[in-house]
Image (tube, helix red, strand yellow):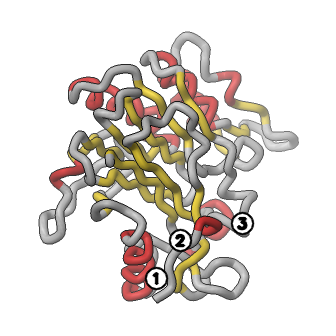
Amino acid sequence: MAELRREHLVRPDWPDLPANVGALATTRLGGVSLAPFDDGNGGGGLNLGLHVKDDPDAVQENRRRLQALLPGRPAWIAQVHGADVVDASLVRPGAPVWTGDASTAVDAGVVCAILTADCLPVLFADLEGKVVGAAHAGWRGLAGGVLQATVARMRAQGAGEITAWLGPAIGPQAFEVGTDVLEAFRAALPDGGADAAFRPYPGRESKYLADMPLLARRLLARDGVDRVHGGTHCTFSEGERFYSYRRDGAGSGRQASLIWRV
């Protein structure tokens, strides 16, 4: 059976990632899903979401290909754009589905996993490699404190200084939002740190282009996390590599960002 190759994946450019921690993000490449969940060029797509009306057998084969690269089964959780953090070691086959938008792990071989199609995936590790985490940060979760909740959980589990990587998400040239989103982040960053992440959309009254990676950096800095990398891949504009709900609507698959201790 075909396997995923290096060009199918994003290997994080993460200079202070501990040696005993592994991390990767998938793309839409290297799978078996058919249109509209394909790779965009007529080949099979690596859609990993079971909830998007793709063929379940295709999704399971895509997950099998991903599993072959990992030390354990990904801890898939039901994401709801909130701020709850799950213990990834409790997510097991046959157990009830855990609901949350982040997970953390302290045991080797436990894989934290987040699915996205435009939302911002954020991977975490402490510099000693004792604790890892992954968060799903759509704008609601980002404004609602999912990153802060993940950092707090990691520190409660023994993490020292924390480093983070921002995975593929809709970029600041494409993420159109309204005043409700601007006001949500003004409330989340009451010191005025939100406004720099919003540019008026030319010709569209009360519309803005929002910079989620910048907002994430501002929110993380407020919690003392200054070692933040990534944030360079735009899911909307890089259609040859990534799924995007804003671009493709209901025909969009889901890619994953994952992290684990070795």
In the structure shown, which secondary structural element does the residue marked by tag 2 occupy?
Answer: loop
The crowd level at tag 3 (other Cα within 10 Å; few <14, some 14-19, many 20+) is some
| Residue 54, numbered circle | 1
Q: Which quadrant holds residue 218? A: top right
| SS class, disc 3 | loop
Q: Which residue is tagged 3?
A: 239
Q: Residue at x 58, y 62 (%)?
A: 9
Rendered location of residue 85, percent (x, y)? 27, 41
Are dots 1 and 2 in contact, CB under 8 Å?
yes
Residue under the image location 13 percent in, 71 percent down? 94
Of callouts 1 and 2, which one flags the residue occurring earlier in the amino acid sequence? 1
User: Residue at the location (61% across, 39% down)?
Assistant: 230
Residue 231 shown left or right of residue 150 in the figure: right
Label 1 Cα crowd, 10 Å radius (few <14 / some 14-19 / many 20+): many
The correct choice, above or below, for 26 with respect to 146 in the image is below
Q: What amino acid type should be assigned to the residue bearing mark 3?
A: Gly
Q: Quadrant of residue 250?
A: bottom right
Q: x, y percentage for residue 132?
A: 34, 39
Amino acid type shown at disc 1: Asp
| Percent coordinates x, y for residue 262 in the rendering | 32, 48
In the picture shown, does residue 119 fall above or below 193? below
Q: Which residue is mark 2?
A: 253
| N-terminal-most mark, 2 or 3 | 3
For disc 2, the neighbor class at 10 Å (few under 14, some 14 to 19, many from 20) is many
